Amino acid sequence: MNSETKPKPKRAAVIGAGFGGLALAIRLQASGIATTLIEGRDKPGGRAYFWEREGFTFDAGPTVITDPDCLRALWRLTDHEMDEDVELVPVMPFYRLNWDDGTNFDYSNDNAKLAREIAKLNPDDLAGYEEFLQYSEGVWREGYVKLGHVPFLDFKSMLKAAPALMKYQAWRSVYSIVSSFVSDEKLREALSFHTLLVGGNPMATSSIYALIHKLEKDGGVWWAKGGTNRLIAGMVRHFERLGGTVRLGDPVTAIETAGNRATGITCASGWRENFDAVASNADVMHSYRDLLTGNRRGPQVAAKLAKKRFSPSLFVVHFGVKGTFPDIPHHMILFGPRYKGLLEDIYDHGVLPRDFSVYLHHPSATDSGMAPEGHSTFYALVPVAHRGKLPVDWNTAGPALEKRVLDEVAKRLMPDLHDRIVTKFHYTPFDFTHDLNAHLGSAFSLEPILTQSAFFRTHNRDDEITNLYFTGAGTHPGAGIPGVVGSARATARLMLSDLARR
């Protein structure tokens, strides 16, 4: 067959250059599908956006990299190595947990050190912790290895997974399962807070999410030198190396359809292109409600999504300061005086609580290049209710909450913090809506409860529009870097199979 008669490659569009969209685009392009990645903002990354101010680099979103092999696999599809584009650095301890009575707990996968940390809290819980790890390994095998990148398109697939879910009591919460193994309250908090990093309430999120401990124990916790944004940049570089096209700064305004087929994409600039398949890494509500207005599936699915539970939002204070702080590790959790009550305020009551727990990110502890010489970069993050539960004016509430958060960090760690600040700004639930089209300002899309898991999340392929696909936090298995990369793997498998048949 000569070049004149050689069939043109199939063409696909991927909406949104977050981790899920990039991972999907790489998989498609690596398989010979001519793929265009379309991002509305001026930089790729989605929630992994970044800012540079006065010599400081501030990552917007995910900062904890686990299961690096799921990322390395994207390069190895075409006999490349991630190290060509990204330098990963191990973080140790994984987290330092601090309570308001001054107790510290360093969490890591160093067995001897971790045993000493547990014994400081309660030596009687050492045996229970080992049993919890065995449980975590079991749910990791069933929930992540076997099902983490499988598309749940029909209820039969859910029924097949049911025996394993029942075996590990998936109807119970992570906190409930942890409490069945250990008795010390601080240790219970230390082993259950991880669900907050993917938008889940430890008191309600399925115990399957205990698999995070196995992921961290085996794969470690990592940092991309230069920031999470450098991991995004490396993925973009690899995608373009394979021949993929990235279109920035031009938001998609419509997914065009004809009957039960997606036909193409229209952008705000007026640019329009036809594609054989369309996939969206955008917010699932935005995708259906705003981008599919020309097809009955848009309002139909949006109405169903509106009845579901969405995860909370976040309030993040970014600040660059004079001085270096070798005693403050890369990741800290500053627990407040309440745990269950605080979670109820965020997830159920929809109020700005009188107290809070803070995730403090200190990347210059690992990577001095994130700040000017002799300075440090931080962000302090607190979960807050999404805008549907907490309809406050963030123009007013933002500055007040920023001061409270910085006051807490000053009280717990840096008494002269306010005098050291060189630059600061905050990011609110309104910004999640405005910048990311996040429904209700949710930071993690659908809340990861059992009745919104697997088949009950947005399907990787639409049930009626046969060449419209989804990836990202709103699909199975959920939020977090390994979650959305796993989602992309499931979606790519579907798309490649479907495109091969057409």
Image: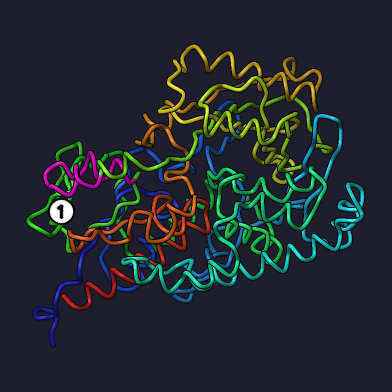
Q: Residue type at mark 1: give it.
A: Gly
- Please give the range of residues in magenta: 284-301
Q: Secondary structure at mark 1?
A: strand
Viewer-side residue, 307 vs 153: 307
Residue 400 appears in the rendering? yes
In the image, residue 50 above or below residue 139:
above
Q: Main secondary structure of the magenta part?
A: helix
Q: Quadrant of the C terminus?
A: bottom left
- Look at mark 1 in the image and give the residue it sits on: 264
Specify the quadrant that holds the N terminus: bottom left
> With respect to residue 133, does 314 lie above or below?
above
In this picture, residue 303 sits left or right of residue 2: right
Residue 75 in sight in this render: no
In this view, 467 is above or below 393:
below
Residue located 12% across and 56% down the image: 263
Q: What residue do we see at 71% from left, 54% from top? A: 178
To which quarter of the image does residue 436 belong?
top left
- Quarter assignment of residue 391: top left
* Residue at 61% over, 32% down: 381
- Left or right placement of residue 304 versus residue 209 in this view: left
* Residue displayed at 82% across by 47% down: 184
Residue 294 within the magenta-colored segment of the rendering: yes
**Can you give x and y, in whole percent of width and height, for residue 92 in the image?**
77, 52
Q: Is residue 153 magenta?
A: no
